[in-house]
Amino acid sequence: MKSKIIVTGGCGYIGSHTVIELIENDFEVVILDDLSNSTEKTLERIHKVTGVTPAFANIDLKNETETNKVFVAHNDAKGVIHFAAHKAVGESVQEPIKYYKNNFYSLLNSLEAQSKNGINNFIFSSSATVYGTPETLPITEKNETQRPFSPYGNTKKIAEEILDDFTKSNEAFSAISLRYFNPIGAHSSGEIGELPSGIPNNLMPYITQIAAGVRDKLMVYGNDYPTKDGTPIRDYIHVVDLAKAHVIAIKRLLKNDQEKSLEFFNLGTGLGYSVLDVINTFESVTNSKLNYEITDRRAGDVPCLYASTDLAKEKLGWTAERELSDMISSSWKWEQNLRNESK
Ligand code: WQD
């Protein structure tokens, strides 16, 4: 019998890629999603790639009664991978209550409902933002966490603290918090990728929309950082590599291989690329020119972030395999497919 995994936010960007990897690893998947920043069409896309349409419930996890009901209905599930959250940094600064309500109510309701139903394995979608402005690089899991700049980031940091308290209070319950660096890229089929609503906040979808003629010009936020070319450095990671790490993490909990009831792992490549590196690689991979202009710094951006990948390698046996050029070419393929579909 296949093990059943509940994936909250499974119609979203990282969630949908993880659902594909779970199906390909012979798991049965149930997606819970309120479609607030995603679409039900993702289910068809997942079917196109895998031949399987996962079970789906349109559920707002802020609603305790609904959440309880769905966990009772799926109380044979073995674990939960929790992606459901709002994630726009800028919006969270404008509307902090929306972010705290959504990201905490959904987390708390899931934790309570699943543990009541004996589903005691939990993978949390965290972020390198919990490290704030790191004092040492590469960032290891031993780096101190700091109060992140944005309410969005703070929801990730506080969620990890909630998991710490909860796993201590409940012996049966185990969790792994995966701290993502900068996920970009798309599935190699071109069927699944990031679907930003409105103007993208993040670098990669903005770049592909410029190349597709949807937007005019990229604003590069500052070139006076203490980096090799003055633009900030990030650890970009292919979303498919990231998705594979979730499958490994849930298997670790199912096999009871975890060393502590709450573990943290960085998910990055260990390599840092500047904004200009990304632009130049995009231009060479796609043989095109990007229209861009250097402007002022964006509030809250840190100069340099890249991961130490040692712990994930040692404990999970996981390393990212895909290079920046793969990340860029897959993002571009996805963007072109989207544009062709909307014609
Ligand atoms: C990357 C670099 C920008 C847009 C954020 C969140 C993080 C995680 C991933 C997600 C920076 C520069 C960007 C643009 C630019 N969260 N840039 N022009 O800020 O590293 O991380 O996304 O859910 O928690 O903080 O990613 O892609 O926004 O920016 O120059 O139009 O690109 O200044 O240096 P970031 P990003």
Image (cartoon, rainbow, N blue to C red):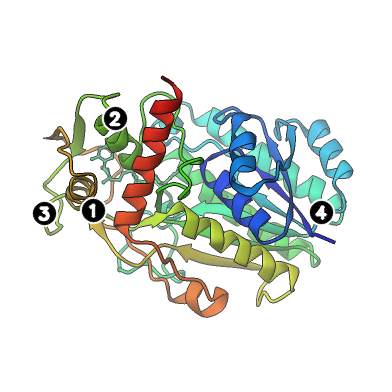
Q: Earlier in the sequence, mark 1 or mark 3?
A: 3
Q: Which residue is mark 4?
A: 77
Residue 280: where, in percent of width, then height? 17, 49
Q: Which residue is mark 2?
A: 212
Residue 114 position (above or below residue 207): below
Q: Which residue is mark 1?
A: 303
Q: Which residue is mark 3?
A: 229
The quarter of the image that holds ligand 1 is: top left
Q: Which circle marks residue 244 in the picture?
A: none
- Residue type at mark 1: give it: Pro
Label 3 and label 2: CA atoms lie apart by: 26 Å
Q: Quadrant of the N terminus?
A: bottom right
- Residue type at mark 4: give it: Ala
- Residue type at mark 2: give it: Ala
Residue 93: where, in percent of width, then height? 41, 32
- Look at the numbered discs 3 and 2 and tell me whether their residues touch, using CB distance below 8 Å: no
Label 4 and label 2: CA atoms lie apart by: 42 Å
Hey, which residue is sitting farthest bottom in the picture? Answer: 314
Name the foreground residue: 159 vs 43.
Answer: 43
Q: Earlier in the sequence, mark 1 or mark 2?
A: 2
- Say which of marks 1 and 4 sits in front: 4
Q: Earlier in the sequence, mark 1 or mark 4?
A: 4
**Residue at point 60%, 56% (across, down):** 21
